Amino acid sequence: MKGVVLAAGDGGRLRPRTQFTSKVLLEVGGQPLIHYPIEALRLAGITDIAVVVGYLGDSVRNALHAVYPRITIIENEQYEEGLALSVLAARSFVMDDPFVLCMGDHPISPDIPRSVLSNGYTECVLCVDWGARLSCQVNDGTRVLVDSNGYISAIGKRLDRWNAMDTGVFRMTTDVFTAIDHLVHRQGASVSVSDVVRYLGLNGQPFATCDVSGTFWGDVDTAEDYHSIDSLLREKNGEPL
């Protein structure tokens, strides 16, 4: 199994911190933000990892290769477009195999990729949290409505009816690439990962879910998220705040 980490965005809502520094290289809890998803994958047993870069990509490449010399770096020149294009950029890396997808700005526990690797599903899976309560999980998070069979029936940031939160960790099959190709042809480059989940569900390939409630995860989008997760991680690691 291969792992893909998306780290192409410009971190616009964290300006001025991200004006000259990639968001994923900001120090959070004593480590660069991207350290957490990479180490979570490695501790879950996934060592063949690619990181998709875009904004300030050379600095991310250099920083990662200094620590992880065998990691694969993939350029997404269309990083200002929808997030699904960063997934598409990894097509030649994953080839015909399923892969675990993580977000470069999501600190996550290794238990999350471990769970999605061990749940036995053969289709696409999204790790969801039924009990998310932290501000860095719910304030700007993607909401998910999971049906009684454990499949996603709706997904989006503004759902009125929902019962779980998207943690940003997926097990994906190559069906997602076909879906992205179709959506880009139909609506242009502004395709989100949620668009892909919805499209597959509407076409007979609904995403299963993996319950990771109670595990640590967060999403760093805003200054509030940054300070909240930094404090949580420092406290968790026993470091001075």
Image (tube, rainbow, N blue to C red):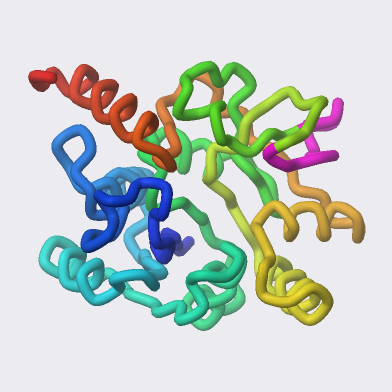
* Horizontal and vertical percent position of residue 16: 27, 51
Viewer can see residue 3: no
Is 155 colored magenta in this rendering?
Answer: yes
Q: Quadrant of residue 65?
A: bottom left
User: Where 206 falls versus 85 (above or below)?
Assistant: above
For the point 45% across and 64% down, the residue is 2
- Would residue 191 appear left or right of 232 to someone viewing this image? right
- Would residue 241 appear left or right of 74 to someone viewing this image? left
* Horizontal and vertical percent position of residue 91: 56, 78
User: Where 108 falls versus 37 (above or below)?
Assistant: above
Viewer-closest of 118 and 52: 52
Residue at the extreme front: 16
For the point 83% across and 59% down, the residue is 199
* Horizontal and vertical percent position of residue 210: 63, 35
For the point 75% across and 48% down, the residue is 207
Instruction: Specify the segment rendered in magenta.
Output: 145-157
Q: Quadrant of residue 123?
A: bottom right
Is 15 colored magenta in this rendering?
Answer: no
Viewer-closest of 184 and 129: 184
- Would residue 90 appear left or right of 204 to someone viewing this image? left
- Would residue 82 appear left or right of 187 to someone viewing this image? left
* Horizontal and vertical percent position of residue 96: 61, 76
Number of disc labels: 0
For the point 67% across and 68% down, the residue is 190
Viewer can see residue 219: yes
Q: Quadrant of residue 9?
A: bottom left
State which quarter of the image contains the C terminus: top left
